[in-house]
Amino acid sequence: MVTPVLEVRDLTKRYGTNLAVDGLSFKAEPGRVLGFLGPNGAGKTTTLRMLLGLTLPTSGDAVVDSLPYRLLSDPIRVVGAVLEGPQFHPGRTGRNHLRVLATAAGLPRSRVEEVLRLVELEGAGNKRVKAYSLGMRQRLSLAGALLGDPRALVLDEPANGLDPQGIRWLRDFLRAQAAAGRTVLVSSHVLAEMAQTVDEVVVISRGKLVAQGSLDELTGGAEAPVWVRSADPGRLEGALAARNGVTAEPGTAAGGWLAVRGASLEDVGNTALEAGVAVFELYRPRQSLESVFLELTGGTEAGR
Amino acid sequence: MTRLVLAELLKFRTTRTFWALAVSALALVLLIVILNLAIDDSLRTETDVRSLLSTAGICGLLTLILGVVTGAGEYRHGTIAWTLLVTPNRLRAVGGSVIACFIGGLAIGVAVSASTALVALPWLSSKDAVMPSAGETLGIFLGGILYGALAAALGAAFGALLRNQVAAVVIVLVLIFVVDPAIAGLLEDVGQFTLTGLGIAMSGGDNDGTELLPLGVAALIWALYTALLTALAVIFTSRRDI
């Protein structure tokens, strides 16, 4: 089965005079976790719901491998979705909820037990959903998303209500899904968590794209100098200066620090090794995703 | 479509609403039948007996409510999003719910009609009541079953169209108990095309002297109403945000 590309092209959604999504375009590729960030009310949920065929775009396209979700013949096997604030019939059990979905999708009941185990809900499967905590509902929602063993995941705030162990489980799970070649598109407001989970980020504010790229690109990692503290800064400075396009300057603080530009961490480490200089510390400072996010979105609700 | 209908039937089996309405329909009909049978003087003529046997048709009102609650309940509980994520084709989604309600209503109709027959027929026989022919009796029961099934299907389509569960139930009750009798009173010829007129025609109930359509025609018109509401529900569900 081919892993789908999730794509949004010039997508616009207008509610009366309110422009919820404004000409948004981005693409989520197989094998990558794409983080979808934005302040509350920025249009993230509306965008994801348009991608899932639950909300109609005013204009533009939201497609799964060039097809609108509504035209997918067996969508549960293609895209698994977690909606924000998932809703369930309170009188049905978690297991029954999944069995209904499995029956509608033509999946065996054994798959229900598998996903209940996967989200660690097998013990609560026979409880009515009204007795579930927020975290348990979120896990049940994830179980529903995973039911068809889909090749792509669209998750809207999946970490909501999860405890720290649950969040860690989710992070590892999403990384594993991407490593297995699946397409993962995930929105979240827990930026520290996103920074550890995603490969790329799309940031929107007031329905518009404000930034897109890898975490390195966004947090300025590529432009920031590499800092190195060594046993012999003078010799290392000379060795680094001999390399094309690399500059090294002593830091203002004491302790033998050098600020190196035009070189990667690997370049600096290898140069020090070749020069026979012991390295004590080596790092590239970067902005946190949170500070980049606040800078891009104005740091206020809905980016206003 | 079969998978979707099976899923909808699984919802019925595992929620209390279906069982509560099924038991209510059974209890209500049996209560009326038993009370009527217990009062000796109430069953003098064949018309009285026919009227008694058609009591099973009352379940049509309850299956109509069942359908409305089912169709609109998806929106009330927000489970429509799950349904449409698995079955994004709106025609299949709404159609599956309508067919499942038809089957659920059919099951309730069968249970109520069979129970009525089991209680009433031996009792009537022991009272030497003037019975309609076997064919007529069978027609009354089959009409009641068909009414139960079609009523549930129409209710499901109406619920899916309106989405607001309380409003949909209130509108249906107002139609049945206020609008239909008013139309029948004011426009006798039109009364036979109302939901109540068609329901009585199908279940073989007492027509109070007003003209009724033949069972088959009444069922066909009811099915057309259902098809129209289903088509509207599909169109609106396709054009609305969930």
Image (cartoon, grey):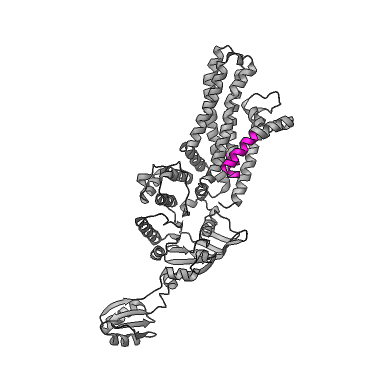
Q: Nearer the viewer, residue A97 or B181?
A: B181
Residue A173 locus on image (x, y percent): 37, 57
Total tally of numbered discs in the picture: 0
Task: Look at the picture and state if B58 lies above or below B10.
Answer: above
Q: Is residue B174 magenta?
A: yes
Residue A96 locus on image (x, y percent): 43, 42
Q: Nearer the viewer, residue A177 or B158?
A: B158
Query: Based on the displayed image, in which of its 4 quarters is residue A250 positioned?
Result: bottom left
Left or right: where A151 falls relative to B143: left
Magenta: main secondary structure = helix
Residue A100 locus on image (x, y percent): 46, 43
Task: Look at the picture and state if A53 lies above or below B194.
Answer: below
Task: Look at the picture and state if A224 lies above or below A143.
Answer: below
- Residue occupying the point 58% across, 35% down: B64
Query: Based on the displayed image, in which of its 4 quarters is residue A215 positioned?
Result: bottom left
Q: Is residue A241 magenta?
A: no
- Residue occupying the point 56% across, 13% down: B125
Tell me which segment is drawn in magenta: B156-176
- Residue occupying the point 54% across, 35% down: B103
Query: Based on the displayed image, in which of its 4 quarters is residue B92 positioned?
Result: top right
Residue B115 locus on image (x, y percent): 52, 23
Left or right: where B210 falls relative to B142: right
Residue A34 shows in the view: yes
Residue B96 shows in the view: no
